Each structure stands twice: as C-alpha cells, then as structure tokens.
Image: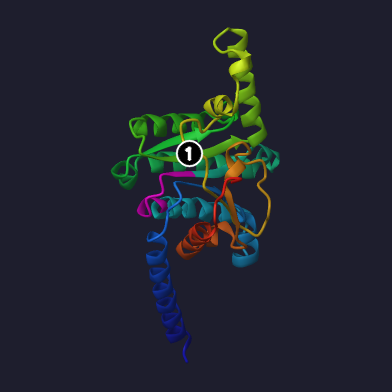
Amino acid sequence: MSMDLKGILTDRAYATYDAQLEKEVRAGEMPQHIAIIMDGNRRYAEEVLGSPPLEGHRLGRKKLEEVLHWCMDLDIKVLTVYAFSMENFKRDSDEVEYLMDLLEQSLYEFADDEDVHANMVGIRVIGQTDLLPEKVRKAMDYAYERTSGYNERFLNMAIAYGGRQDIANAVRAIAQDAVDGKISVDEIDEDTVSGYISTTGMPDPDLVLRTSGEVRVSNFLLWQLAYSELYFTDVYWPGFRHIDLLRAIRTYQQRVRRFGR
C-alpha cells in the first residue's frame, strides 16, 4: 500500500471517529467552563519537529485559536487558558519577549475575530497585568473594549497569573474593605472570597485539562478548581486535536459528580 493511500485511509478513519465521538458528546451534558493548562510547546518543537523552542510557541498560539473556535462550536460558555504563569518570567529574556509578542498578537486577533463577535465572547485577561509590557496591556485593553458588551460567553487569558497570588489579592481586597467598614468580618465566607477572585461572576471550571503528560495543576485557578474534574493527556499542546478535546469532554460526562454528597 502506498504511503499516500495509507494516509487517505487514516484521515478517513479519523474523520469518521471524530464525527461519531462529536455526536456522542453533543448528546451529553456539556461543561459550561473548561480551563486548559497549555503545556508542551517547547518539547513539541524539539522532539516532534526538531525545531527551535520558539517554533513550538508559535504553533501553540495557532492551536489556541483553533481550540477557541472548537469551544464556540460546542457552545462552551467559558474557556480559561493558562497563557503565561508568574514562573514563566524566569525563562530566558528572548523567549519571554517572544511570548509577549505572541500574546499581543493573539489579543488583537481574537478581538477582531468575526466568530468571537458572532458568538458574543467577552475577552478578559486575569493576572498581575501591571507586570506586563505596555504593548500587551494596550492589546488587553483593546480586546476588553471591543468585547465589553458581551456576557454570554467568555475567553479568559491568564497572563502573569498565579493561583496563590489570585487568592492573596482577593484576601487583601477583602481586608481593605473590612477596614473601611464596607463589609463585616463576620460576613466573610466562601461566597465573599469568590466575589473578589479574578473570575468573579463566572462559573467555576467544570473541567480542567492539561496537555503534555504532566500531572499537576501548577498554581492554576487554585480557588476555582476545588470541585473541578481533572483530565491529563500526554499530547503536547501544539499537537492537540479536536478529537482530544472531545475525549476530554466525554470523560467529564462519564464521571459522576457528587460534590461530597
């Protein structure tokens, strides 16, 4: 069998399975909020492509664009992605600068995407945004202003983000409001903290997905993921396929969520 024919048969088999799986997933309960730790860009470039690590980041940015559109098509209400952690600032300065360029580009492109507007997706950046370069903050403001009227669906990009910092910021704001007499200490409960956290007003993630084979949450949405279903796949982020997203959702649908009951 020629390689071309083998490739055609493989593509057809994949397309058939993808269609069957999508039909099955659409018939089940869809998660409202999916959060993704996008991991494995550098390893994909080096191990799969034999290319410099920056090529993996470029392909990772393109993959996020694809996944955003897949989620819109599946009617996922909220997508939150770990785009740049606080720890990522420790990387080589050239790599950090390149990543900032990609984030700037993504924010402008998503803000001008026709499908984003057709689906009324509000774009938000969560994290220590004061640490970001001015060009990224301008792109962030542009995306927010272009989509500020949308509250049906959301894309949250966690940039310069850390879950512990998120909680600490919420506690600091609560303490200040208590000192100012805006709230009583006796009134502070879980709902209070949720009202000050970065994703306030949105449902907590139903499904937290991490690519690349690593099995940890890496300081991502620590408050919000208390009752989330966790799903880990060994696929590197740039190689993440539509079928991989469907498999993650199907696994979520097959789990029985008791919430301690």
* Residue 204 pos. (x, y %): 52, 40
The image quarter containing residue 234 is bottom right
Would you place residue 131 above or below residue 40 in this image?
above
Question: Going 41% across and 59% down the picture, which residue do you hit?
Answer: 28
> Which amino acid type is shown beneath numbered disc 1?
Pro
Q: Residue at the spot x=55%, y=58% of the render? A: 255
Q: Judge the density around disc 1: few (<14), some (14-19), many (≥20) Cα neighbours within 10 Å.
A: few
Farthest residue, direction front:
261
Examine the structure image and report whether residue 142 is included in the region drawn in magenta: no
Residue 115 image position (x, y, % from top left): 32, 47
Residue at (58, 7) in percent of width and height? 180
The x and y percentages for residue 157 are 51, 40
Colour theme: rainbow
Q: Is residue 19 visible?
A: yes
Residue at position x 42%, y 62% from top? 25
Front-most of residues 1 and 121: 121
Kindly give the residue lying farthest to the bottom in the view shown: 1
Secondary structure under tag 1 reads loop
161 sits left or right of 74 in the view:
right
Q: Indicate the position of residue 235 as horizontal and vertical percent values.
A: 59, 63
- Residue 23 shown left or right of residue 216 in the figure: left
Span colored in magenta: 71-79
Circle 1 residue: 203
User: In this view of the protein, can residue 98 be seen by the observer?
Assistant: no
Name the residue at the top extreme. 180
